[in-house]
């Protein structure tokens, strides 16, 4: 009967490979904890709230007996389930003040953002080869951590650096109205030191869907070559009908040499809550496991809070408030292809250098780079967690070094 809850059905949701992964994380107790989490999610989906409430209490009790990442993951998921049951939705899902600070700790703790920036920069650098004036439009400016490395690489280019123009797009920051300008000032100081002609504009937009190509003061393509960069941003547009289509249309109007995109390699945007919950539980369990080798305990804790906020959004929120709508590379391939873009192969050079980057990070143990039809993925123990892809207009031709 609809609304009845059958806890014996829940373990079937876990395929054998996932069961093995959870046993590695925390032994057989971890399986019991995961079973309770999934049972709670199903009870909530069936609107059987009294059962869901009881299971949240059981989850907290079971989590207290666990050690390591499984305890932390379960605690964040229990909090998110609590919020969903009682409709206590987090406020301001697009408020970037705290996430910007947390993201800096995440950058220091693990190689995900470093890998994202490095692989995207490599593709941009190769697309700009031989160009005299270049313009990067960054959809994910944040603290501007991606750009010093690219500027230094351009400065070392044979024949001298091109003139480098950067448009950094970001939301308004109530705690610091000059945030984007401060990032630009720091980059301008670096540019002067390394003798790169530099032009910067910070552009405030609370949603990328508010952008129009005419706002960006684009110059003719024969004068200035454009690259567009997005790291963990485009999935947020999927919360509003038509937003991603509008942004991809504007992207085409920019006539970029290349578009670089980094996204979480998972599907947290399904219409069925239990499926979304199961996928996100596996994904974030793997993410938390990868943080365990962190040297700095402060960075690790703040990184866990950073991921915990994502968990809360995926699980507790719905409608336009659910902005962490991660989708897989195959889904983005379909979307980008339909919008008139074709993939640019990231060459073997980028693969080798990304692998070297991981080797420098905690000895590279557990991490690996995976090539997927010209795109690069960062894996933790063979589970892909983020994916870098590069795109060009279907009628363009970009050669990437091998």
Image: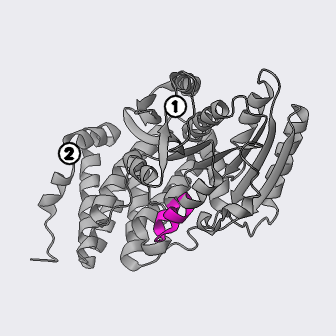
Name the residue at 31% across, 66% down: 273
Prevailing SS of the magenta stretch: helix
Query: Which quadrant does the N terminus fall into?
Result: bottom left
| Closer to the camera in the image, 75 or 253 | 253
Q: Is residue 22 above or below residue 278?
A: above
| Closer to the camera in the image, 157 or 80 | 157
Residue 15's disc number: 2
Find out whether residue 195 is within the magenta segment. Answer: no
* Circle 2 SS class: loop
Query: Which quadrant does the C terminus fall into?
Result: top right
| Quarter location, residue 396 | top right
Residue 255: % across, % down: 63, 49
Residue 42: % across, % down: 24, 67
Q: Residues within 10 Å of mark 1 (few under 14, many from 20)?
A: many
- Pointer 1 or 2: first along the chain: 2
Name the residue at 43% across, 49% down: 337
Most distant residue in the left direction: 1
| Residue 279 at least partly seen | yes
**Relative side of 172 to 9, left or right:** right
**Relative side of 196 to 342, left or right:** right
- Provide the residue designation for mark 1: 346
């Amino acid at each position: 009967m609809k609304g009845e809850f059958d806890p014996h059905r829940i373990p079937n949701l876990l395929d054998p490979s996932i069961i093995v992964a959870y046993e590695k994380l925390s032994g057989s107790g971890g399986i019991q904890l995961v079973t309770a989490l999934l049972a709670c999610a199903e009870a909530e989906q069936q609107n059987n709230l009294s059962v869901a409430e009881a299971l949240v209490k059981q989850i907290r009790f079971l989590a207290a007996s666990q050690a390591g990442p499984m305890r932390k993951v379960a605690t964040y998921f229990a909090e998110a389930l609590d919020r969903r049951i009682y409709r206590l939705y987090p406020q301001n899902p697009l408020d970037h003040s705290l996430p910007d600070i947390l993201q800096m700790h995440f950058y220091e703790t693990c190689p995900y953002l470093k890998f994202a920036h490095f692989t995207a920069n490599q593709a941009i650098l190769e697309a700009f080869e031989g160009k005299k004036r270049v313009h990067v439009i960054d959809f994910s400016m944040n603290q501007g951590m991606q750009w010093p490395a690219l500027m230094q690489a351009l400065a070392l280019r044979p024949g001298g650096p091109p003139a480098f123009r950067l448009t950094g797009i970001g939301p308004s920051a109530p705690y610091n109205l000059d945030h984007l300008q401060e990032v630009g000032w720091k980059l301008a100081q670096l540019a002067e030191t390394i003798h790169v002609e530099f032009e910067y504009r910070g552009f405030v937009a609370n949603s990328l869907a508010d952008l129009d190509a005419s706002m960006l003061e684009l110059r003719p393509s024969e004068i200035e070559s454009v690259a567009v960069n997005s790291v963990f941003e485009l999935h947020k547009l999927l919360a509003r009908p038509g937003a991603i289509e509008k942004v991809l249309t504007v992207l085409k109007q920019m006539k970029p040499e290349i578009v670089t995109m980094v996204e979480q390699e998972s599907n947290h945007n399904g219409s069925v809550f239990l499926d979304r919950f199961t996928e996100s539980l596996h994904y974030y369990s793997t993410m938390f496991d990868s943080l365990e080798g962190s040297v700095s305990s402060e960075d690790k804790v703040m990184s866990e809070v950073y991921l915990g906020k994502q968990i809360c959004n995926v699980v507790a929120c719905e409608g336009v408030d659910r902005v962490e709508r991660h989708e897989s590379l195959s889904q983005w391939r379909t979307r980008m292809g339909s919008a008139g873009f074709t993939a640019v192969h990231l060459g073997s050079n980028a693969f080798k250098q990304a692998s070297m980057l991981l080797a420098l990070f905690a000895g590279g143990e557990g991490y690996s780079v995976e090539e997927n039809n010209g795109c690069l993925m960062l894996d933790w123990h063979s589970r892909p967690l983020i994916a870098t892809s590069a795109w060009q207009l279907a009628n363009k031709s970009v050669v990437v070094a091998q």
